[in-house]
Amino acid sequence: MELKDIKAIIDLMKKNSITEFELEEKDSKIRLKRGLNGASGAAPQAEESIQMIPLPVAAPILPATTTAAAPIANSGEIDIKSPMIGTLYRSPSPESAAYVEVGAEVNPDSVVCIIEAMKVMNEIKAEVKGVITQILVENGKPVEFGQPMFKVRPS
């Protein structure tokens, strides 16, 4: 990872009040942490650190989509959660229709949105069969890891 990429991540963290960020790639891992109050270097007790941790080449990397669907909630609905930090887009392009709307039927392979992370567009699949009952994040808004984006009534 290049220094300009790290600086861009730090800027995004400041802009979106994110206090921790972690990214694993094939042969490295980066973890960024900001001070308790999210302030930059202005306050003496605020702390920012960057760690680059080399990983063994044969380290297994789990696919990001393994955390997208959550267990069934008390209401009987399932949350489709963000598997990463980024910007959510509900359609493949600004001129296109949204992937899903409330009432749309989805199956495990249905694409429900795209999350842009570091200029890479990642298609997010429903990973569950059912009907979309709620859309929890607006188009073009940032999402956090594990943040619910959609609610699905399983079928």
Image (cartoon, helix red, strand yellow):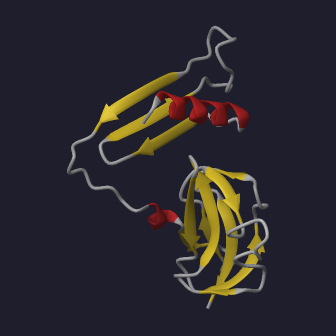
Residue closest to the far top: 44
Among the 4 quarters of the image, the one containing residue 39: top right
- Viewer-nearest residue: 93 or 21: 93
Image quadrant containing the N terminus: top left
| Residue at screen point 66% across, 62% down | 148
Where does the image place residue 34, in percent across and percent down from the top left? 59, 26
Where 43 sits versus 91, above or below? above
Where does the image place residue 11, in percent across and percent down from the top left? 65, 31
Among the 4 quarters of the image, the one containing residue 88: bottom right
| Residue at screen point 63% across, 25% down | 36
Where does the image place residue 80, in percent across and percent down from the top left? 61, 69
- Viewer-nearest residue: 51 or 152: 51
- Viewer-nearest residue: 1 or 43: 1
| Residue at screen point 68% across, 25% down | 37
Among the 4 quarters of the image, the one containing residue 107: bottom right
Where 124 sits versus 56, above or below? below
Where 116 sits versus 31, above or below? below
* Number of numbered markers: 0
| Residue at screen point 58% across, 76% down | 126
Where does the image place residue 75, in percent across and percent down from the top left? 70, 77
- Viewer-nearest residue: 140 or 145: 140
Q: Is residue 16 left or right of residue 61?
A: right
Image quadrant containing the C terminus: bottom right
